[in-house]
Amino acid sequence: MKYTNDELGFFIDKIKLKAEDMPKYRTQINNLKEKLENKIKNDDSHGLKVTKYILAGSWKKHTILKPTGDFPIDIDLVLFVGGDDNIQNDLNKLFEYIITYLEEIYPQKDIRKVVDAKGNTKSITIIFSGSGLEVDIVPVVPISSPVEYVWQPSRRGGSKYITSISKQLDFSVNNRKNNPSYTSIVRALKWWRNEKEIKPTDDEPGLSSYVIELIVAYLDINYGIETNIEEAIIRFFQFVSGPNFPVISFKNAINTVPTYYTSSIYVADDTNNENNVSKRMTDSKWKEIVEEASEAFDSLNIAQSKRNEGDTLSEWKHVFGSTFNIK
């Protein structure tokens, strides 16, 4: 049996953040925004300055999932830092500035816990009590050319790259406009990724939300927009589990894919083909992801061949977990 978009929509509604649950998070986000706006407006210091901010990530891209025990609500807050033309060459100084900046806004929070024993800073996260909301702070340094591009440090420290936050968000908007099922497809695949425990962590690579978004977009761009949620999900699993996963790049992005890279796969940032957003991927982790995708592809094809509702549902539960249902 095949499921319609309306039937799968029941499942999607179950796994996405409910509208009635958003106000408690939005209140904390708005409070943070107000603090930032006041700080930016009244900052008369010389040298490094936060000049503006942008909310990004799955919250802004409309692909956020409901919180679970292992996966809280998280958003990306991008802080644009100016006042030093060479600050991108001293990431420790940049992170130290951001930590001090945030300590002034939230003196009651332990912002400095992100600094390890060697003095290195990785990702900076503000956690709000009560709701459990996690705000990942992303400092970036604007550059004059190309327009709208920035230097962005790696979330896990040690390197930087050129990208465009605004163009990434525009790319997401266009994907949603071109395919009304895009966010549902991405949400379902993110849920599958979480269910199979192949999400990246600080300690090991995995299938990031951004990579999922880019693969779904790549398939729409290169193989035709697929608005049928079931068929799009199956197409994703078939593509990922195929024997010859291609180098993924985007024609409207700047630069070209380098001739040499060390990761198992290459998925380019949609704004800069030089950025491999899957650069941490190892052969062993990719093999695990491929095996999970292959198993999911087989299960959903079997589900389509079943003649009764119970057998079809059982195969989908095998892929998306025991909470999957269509009514």
Image: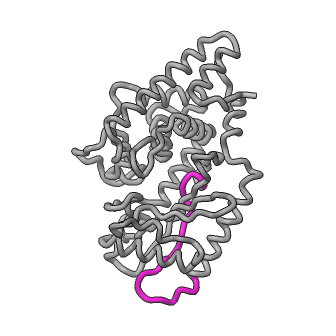
Q: Say whether residue 251 is visible.
A: no
**Residue at (37, 37) in percent of width and height:** 285
Q: Quadrant of the C terminus?
A: top right
Q: Say whether residue 97 is visible.
A: yes
Q: Position of residue 181 (x, y in %)?
A: 62, 37
**Taking 51 as reference, is 241 above or below it?**
above
Q: Nearer the viewer, residue 14 or 277?
A: 14
Left or right of residue 185: residue 206: left
**Taking 319 as reference, is 283 above or below it?**
below
Look at the image and say whether residue 54 sits in the magenta stretch.
Answer: yes
**Taking 81 as reference, is 240 above or below it?**
above
Left or right of residue 20: residue 2: left
Q: What segment is highlighted magenta in the picture?
A: 41-59
Q: Position of residue 22 (x, y in %)?
A: 71, 55
Numbered label tally: 0
Q: Quadrant of the N terminus?
A: top right
Look at the image and say whether residue 105 sits in the magenta stretch.
Answer: no
Q: Within the image, what quadrant is residue 91 found in?
A: bottom left
**Residue at (60, 42) in percent of width and height:** 183
Q: Position of residue 311 (x, y in %)?
A: 65, 14
**Residue at (47, 89) in percent of width and height:** 45
